[in-house]
Amino acid sequence: MNNNFTNKNIESLKVGSFDWRVIQDQMKNKLGLEVYESWLKKINFEEEFNNYIILNVPTRFIRDWITSRYLDQILQIVKTYKKDIIRIEFRIADQKITVEKNKKDIHHSVENKENISFIKDSYLQYNRIDPNKRLDNFLTGSSNKLAYEASVKVSENISHYNPLYIYGGVGLGKTHLLNGIGLELKKNNKVMFISAERFMYQFVKSIKSNDMVKFKEYFRNTDILLIDDIQFMNGKEAMQEEFFHTFNALLDKGSQIIVSADRAPNKLSRIQERIKSRFSGGLVVDIQKPDIELRKKIVEQKTNELNKLYSEQINISREIQDYISSEINTSIRELVGAINRVVSFSRIYNKIPNLAETKVVLKDLLNLAENKVTIDLIQTLVCKFFKISKNEMLSSRRSRYLVRPRQTAIYLTKILTSKSLPEIGREFSNRDHTTIIHSVKTIEKLKDKDPEMLENINKLKNQILYNNKDNEI
Ligand code: ADP
Ligand code: MG
């Protein structure tokens, strides 16, 4: 085991590659020492590919246990180091083979030639309430006080805010609040916590399998409906129709509805007016970016929380804490991520990084916070790289020399921003989301078999993330 805190070690933390020990350490933090010792420790890292990794476990039983309980969280942790990873596959050390298309198939798995199982990216959270995101560990400042207070009232069942609509930018605590409300109300009520994307997925699936009756019953029977990221609901008249009716039926019978979004109700595109107006009919509160006081409180709390987990204390200096709270100022998620990283590194290399080392460890987070990656930046840099004009890129012309750059820009937008497929489509001259999926898949395939393509993608990624023209990662 290498205990030297060398630059090379730190380098391994940059976007695009990761150190399995760091992931293990984060699993310990996130899922607890007991779970880690009993299960997760048994996972070995095997291989990394462009968008998936292969892990190795000793037995099928352990694999099933892990996939059914912890895989989503493991995937989330892995993604913080390498965004492109969308699934995790397992190989069982010395055993025959199973292939699992997704979690639900675990109990009737298919025998197959390769000793691999996998689960698709299930960022679509589905009624899974996280016991760690509670109202009592939600820190408040002027930026989120109103949203917090409204959430507390709703969770005490004493509010007449119905629906409660919470909005704000990425990583500012919306899901945490919804989750916290869910935890409280779950004690005495039937709670349904679902992302809007999952709602759509479930809806389409029910239509295909002729199960609409069940779908309706399912949603209309709940006492509390929490819908996360409503901005991702779009289009599909029939679905909006269903949503609207569900929504009204629930309000009529006195069920509480809580909605989160990244923007105010009137700014939602692609959602019917009457739904927006129902959203506005309750209480609408926003969460702003955290000010320096709140950021400091969060850094402090998070550091203490992590210290409680272990016997040896890690004293991240005040200087570094202050540096982190002053530099990472756009999202609480990144702030928490930064602390996690510094603590993990200190534990693994037995050394608390100094300021210069901290900067290296956090390089990508700092850059991302400074210059957010926009579609415009991606389009500009890709056009420049391939020497075409933006008009050409956005045109409907299908000459070969335009198609690849266009697909490349679309692919990069998908992996480097959090835009949904329809949103990306709109930014590329209103292309359909199926075209977007096709572009992403095409580039993924090419990247795996064409080294030049891979190199171009890496150069561009580097330019976009670091605004770095000399292509060194
Ligand atoms: P959003 O849903 O708005 O994108 P999340 O709720 O997922 O953001 O928050 C991102 C991370 O920051 C989570 O780990 C969450 O627990 C943490 N977090 C956000 N706001 C707070 C807060 N006020 N106090 C403590 N932790 C917070
Ligand atoms: Mg969220």
Image (spheres, grey):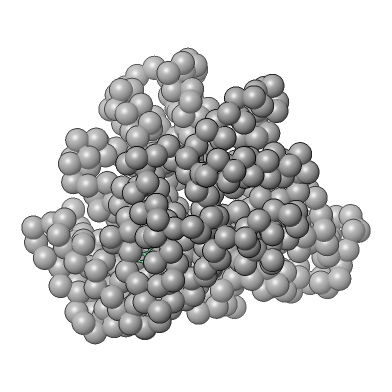
Please report the residue visible at 39 percent of the width from the left and 39 percent of the height from the top: 189
Query: Considering only vertical position in the picture, is 393 above or below 210?
Result: below
Which percent across, then down, holds residue 78?
A: 40, 51
Describe residue 444's horizontal placement relative to residue 349 as left or right: right
- Residue 438 visible somewhere in the drawing: no
Please report the residue visible at 39 percent of the width from the left and 17 percent of the height from the top: 96
Which percent across, then down, holds residue 454?
A: 61, 55
In-front residue for pair 447/354: 354
Query: Considering only vertical position in the picture, is 154 above or below 315?
Result: above
Q: How many marks?
A: 0
- Residue 388 visible somewhere in the drawing: yes
Which percent across, then down, holds residue 376?
A: 70, 72
Query: Considering only vertical position in the picture, is 133 above or below 101?
Result: below
Query: Considering only vertical position in the picture, is 69 above or below 266?
Result: above
Please report the residue visible at 81 percent of the width from the left and 54 percent of the height from the top: 431
Which percent across, then down, holds residue 75?
A: 42, 45
Please report the residue visible at 42 percent of the width from the left and 18 percent of the height from the top: 107
In-front residue for pair 110/290: 290
In-front residue for pair 13/80: 80
